[in-house]
Image (cartoon, rainbow, N blue to C red):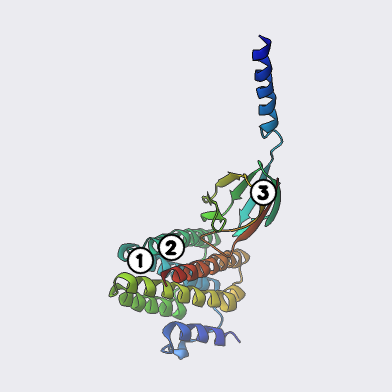
Amino acid sequence: MRPVIRPALAALALAFIASPALAATITVTIDKLVFSPASVEAKVGDTIEWVNKDVFAHTATVKGGWEVMIPPKSTGRITLKTAGAVDYFCRFHPNMKGRLDVSP
Amino acid sequence: MFTRPIVALAALLLMGAAPLAQAADKPTDPQIAHIAYTAGTIDIEAAKLAIKHSKTKEVVDFAKDMERDHEAVNKQALELVKKLKVTPEDNATSQALAKAAKEERAKLAKLKGAEFDKAYIENEVAYHKQVNGALETLLIPSASNAELKSLLETGLKIFQGHEQHAEHVAGMLK
């Protein structure tokens, strides 16, 4: 029994360590074409949730990277997978700008 | 003191052919609502033409964005005037806008392929620039109702976004 249980326990322990138990959800509100807060500090594994109060569709787009669609009066979300600072903008209204500073 | 901007706007829209004698005092809220609604409708009409005519994905996507956003703004505008019990009032600026737009649509309808795409997008850049100028210098400062002013300010941000978006698409077509 033992040799079987140990690896299983180890795997379980690993799963707990790797699970995003401490991951946070950070809300960015969009109101009248403004991302607020415009700049957010987050960690890998955190989720950014954009809450769109406008009647217009928006996006959070990283040039050459990811894009999240944020429909009118709705939300869009992404779980951060890589560390680093990225600037994002709305592809439909490029005058809307935001920034994510993602630490490991 | 408000004569100059409205003359400038009308002149800009009619490219010098504006009947300058029509230049009035600063527009009233019912007139401003009419001008803003007309400006939105014009861009929706242009978008519909582009969706039908263009074979270029970027251009069609852009046109669909314009149609969707301007319909949303105009819907809000209609709800607001209803709430404020304001009846939008036709005026020389709205008429000048509509006339210039009709001529532009007739011009565009004769073009095909890349020529159409280029002319449509270039007109979108120029048109949004004109409307933004009018919003900033005339319509927003003249609006007396706070809610109308606020809607116009949101409209300005949307239009500024569209101008940049149109410039981006224009850059891709080159």
Q: Quadrant of the C terminus of chain B?
A: bottom left
| Residue at mark 3 to residue at mark 1: CA–CA distance | 41 Å
Question: Residue A5 in the image: x percent, y percent?
Answer: 66, 14
Judge if badges 3 and 1 mark residues of a common chain.
no
A8 to B87, vertically: above or below: above
Query: Badge 3: how crowded within 10 Å, few (<14), some, or many (20+)?
Result: some
Residue for point 59% across, 45% down: A78
The CA span between labels 1 and 2 is: 9 Å
Q: Are marks 1 and 2 in contact (CB under 8 Å)?
A: yes
* Relative height, residue A55 to residue B39 (above, below): above
Output the chain of dot 1.
Answer: B
Q: Is label 3 in a helix, a strand or a loop?
A: loop
Within 10 Å of the Cα at label 2, are there few (<14), some (14-19), or many (20+) other Cα atoms? many
Secondary structure of the residue carrying numbered label 1? helix
Sooner in the amino-acid sequence: mark 1 or mark 2: 1
Q: Quadrant of residue A23?
A: top right
Return the x and y of residue B88 as percentages of the image width and height. Answer: 47, 69
Above or below: residue A35 compared with residue B135? above
> Badge 3 is on which residue?
A83
Q: Position of residue B36 (x, y in %)?
A: 49, 70
Q: Chain of mark 2?
A: B
Three-letter code for the amino acid on which mark 3 is drawn: Ala
Instruction: Give the number of the disc on residue B50.
Output: 1
- Looking at the picture, which amino acid does disc 1 mark? Ala
Check disc 2 and give the amino acid type.
Phe
Return the residue at label 2: B62
